Amino acid sequence: MSAFISKRSISIAMTTCLSMLSQIATADDASIAQKLANPVASLISVPIQINYDDKYGIGEKGSIWKTNVQPVIPVSLNDDWNMISRTILPFIDQSDFPVQGQGESGVGDVVQSFFFSPKAPTAGGLVWGVGPVINIPTATKDALGPRAWAAGPTGLVLKQSGPWTYGALGNHLWSFAKEDNTEINASFLQPFVSYITPKKLTYYVNTESTYNWDSKDWSVPINVGANQLMKFGNQLMQIGGGVRYWADSGEFGPKGWALRMNIVFVFPKG
């Protein structure tokens, strides 16, 4: 009986995979894949990013799962300008951090960005956007976030040429209202490059570097991975993941290699 169930399960899995691959190969969604590579494109999406990092804390025994829910909502302001809302809502589960035997789970601080971006690229083909970024103290426990209000500028610039997208996103946060003695004074820089194949498979490389001006520490993860655009029924999705390497981190930050998985729900207009 178990052998029958096993063979039947394998058959169902193979049939499902073949169906998915057929949808990938025939879907005419190249423009959607290109828009997903552009953080300020006029496209509603809900990325869910799952990160696993370890070698945290004293003795490098700690590990952290962080799931970021990141809805992206564009709003047309007029014939020439869009406003793009980008939210990062983190759900965190950390073990043996900050010391072995301790751990917390819950919600971290929300980071909310608004980009004001021209609808048309410049004459040179550049896409850009600028606006404010806000850290909202939503952390449910002290260990899960600074729990401080902070704000500052954010901006990005990119260019898309055929299957290639390359550019950089950055921001800076200063705290202006806080609990206890928590301070935020940090700069974030994310240079990125991606390549989209004819099968709508997007390969990407980026860093998500943060510099803490108070502790004088860099955190520099280098991310490499791929995401495939596909359909499940009528739902357009991008699914993939990759690895990252911590080139630098603070004294108790993560070390070595880590994992990332991505699921993006896409809602094209019309």
Image: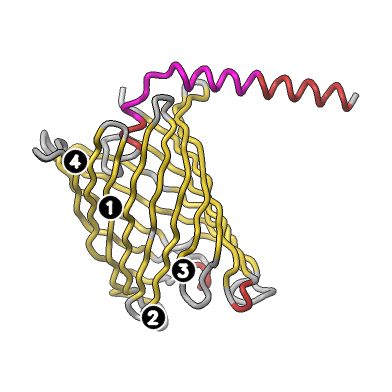
Instruction: Pick whichever of labels 2 and 1 is earlier in the sequence.
Output: 1
Q: Kindly identify the residue that appears in the image at 40 percent across and 48 percent down.
A: 205
**Residue at image point 62% right, 21% down:** 16
Give the left or right position of residue 117, taking residue 198 as reference.
Answer: left
Image coordinates of residue 132 in percent, x first then y, are 23, 58
Please tell me which residue lies in front, 245 or 47.
Answer: 245
Rounded to the nearest angstrom, the CA distance separating label 1 from label 4 is: 19 Å
Residue indicated by mark 2 = 215
Circle 2 SS class: loop
Q: Which residues are magenta?
A: 15-32
**In this figure, which residue is indicated by the disc labeled 1?**
168
Instruction: Please identify the quadrant where the N terminus is shown.
Output: top right
Residue sitting at x 37%, y 66%: 210
Q: Is residue 50 left or right of residue 178?
A: right
Of the residues tagged 2 and 3, which is closer to the observer?
2
Disc on the earlier residue, 2 or 4: 4
Q: Is residue 207 left or right of residue 257?
A: left
Report the amino acid beneath label 3: Gly
The x, y position of residue 171, in whole percent, is 27, 61
Q: Main secondary structure of the magenta part?
A: helix
The first of marks 1 and 4 along the sequence is 4
Q: Which residue is mark 4?
A: 82
Depth check, front residue: 255 or 2: 255
